[in-house]
Image: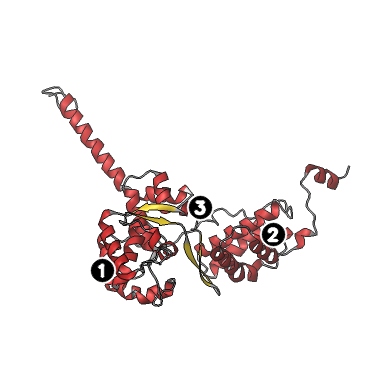
Amino acid sequence: MNNVESVIIAGDWTDPERGKISLGEYASKWIDERPGLRPRTAELYRWLLRKHIAPYIGETELRRLSAAVIRQWRAERLAAGVSTSVLAKCYRLMRGVLNTAVDPDAIITRNPCKVPGADKENPDERPLVTVAQVFELASKVPDRWGAMVLLAAFTSLRYGEVTALRRCDLAENASTVRVTRAFVDVPGKGLSAGPPKSRAGVRTVTVPHAVRPLLLKHLALFVKPDDDALLFTGKKGNPLRRPNFAQLSKWTEVVEDLGLKGLHFHDLRHAGNVWASKAGMSTKDLMARMGHDDMRAALIYQRATDEAGERIAETLSKLIEEHRRTERPKGKPENGAAE
């Protein structure tokens, strides 16, 4: 039995001819054939492939890819000024593509994406607004957008989720909001309604009491009586695209006037997640409110919140001091030293 036969019997053999397909061609087919890929995600993948991968290593055959090739590609793109966040997305895309090339396609025997830390993003820390700033922001934008600001902040909804809300999704007393879908802006196709970003995105979120009257006022003033009427629309009653919202709400002008230049709408959700983590919620409860089925994001918020730890430590310190006061023998110094 020769070496090739041994490898075939062991199940480790791959056809060298199949490995001649280029990374760009294989990745493009992978995106097209990927089941359950959301339109916006597919568009992002195509953009990453077209912009940052195909022009540089797209012509490389799969069989000739190695960790050294991937590492050099990344180093050169970093040197060209591409951000670590964008390259991390590219790297994760290639890793997923090449995982399929290994199994089940058996085109290559191992995944060459073995660059430590290449999948990690280091985005700039986003600004954290206060509760007071959120209410001030809601009061400064035109009236019909104030409720949208409050909902995003105090229910931790994503932009696509809050703009897809209908009258029937809000409880009659505005005590809860039900998230069952989200708008996705697909280049060349416009807005389309689909499921939320993750399976856990389908959820019901409790609205703080202080916000409910403002939501009911918004319903009365700006929302049609039909159950499927959108809570927030453009001028003609159509679904609200991001550029339209920015223009209609005068977002850039308002946030600059409030000293919050650079604040994104998504930062409202970020603030809401931080506040929720400070409320002492369990990881599971925080995941449910955020609409995440992966606990990593919830854990990040919980680790970033150390105020609860400070309060716990302060409480324990008081208990210790109380214990010392009640247990210390009369006339004996606190540290047990001789008088």
Q: Amino acid at mark 2?
A: Leu
Find residue 177 and report its horizontal and vertical position in percent: 37, 56
Q: Nearer the viewer, mark 3 or mark 2?
A: 3
Q: Quadrant of residue 245?
A: bottom left
Q: Residue furthest front?
A: 226
Task: Quarter of the image for the N terminus: give it.
Answer: top right
- Classify residue 298 as left or right of residue 310: right
Q: Residue furthest right?
A: 1
Considering depth in this image, is 338 or 35 the residue closer to the camera? 35
Residue underneath mark 2:
65
Please report the residue visible at 39 percent of the width from the left and 48 percent of the height from the top.
286
Question: Badges 3 and 2: C-beta atoms under 8 Å apart?
Answer: no
Secondary structure category for the residue under label 1: helix
Marks 3/2: CA distance?
35 Å
Find residue 101 and report its horizontal and vertical position in percent: 70, 55
Q: Can see residue 93?
A: yes
Q: Count the marks.
A: 3
First of labels 1, 3 by sequence position: 1
Considering depth in this image, is 134 or 144 the residue closer to the camera? 144
- Classify residue 307 as left or right of residue 58: left
Residue underneath mark 3:
199
- Classify residue 13 as left or right of residue 102: right
Q: Quadrant of residue 256?
A: bottom left
Marks 1/3: CA distance?
34 Å
Q: Amino acid at mark 3?
A: Arg
Please report the residue visible at 78 percent of the width from the left and 59 percent of the height from the top.
18
The crowd level at tag 3 (other Cα within 10 Å; few <14, some 14-19, many 20+) is few
Find residue 200 and report its horizontal and vertical position in percent: 47, 51
Q: Amino acid at mark 1?
A: Ser
Task: Quarter of the image for the C terminus: give it.
Answer: top left
Q: Residue furthest top?
A: 329
Residue underneath mark 1:
139
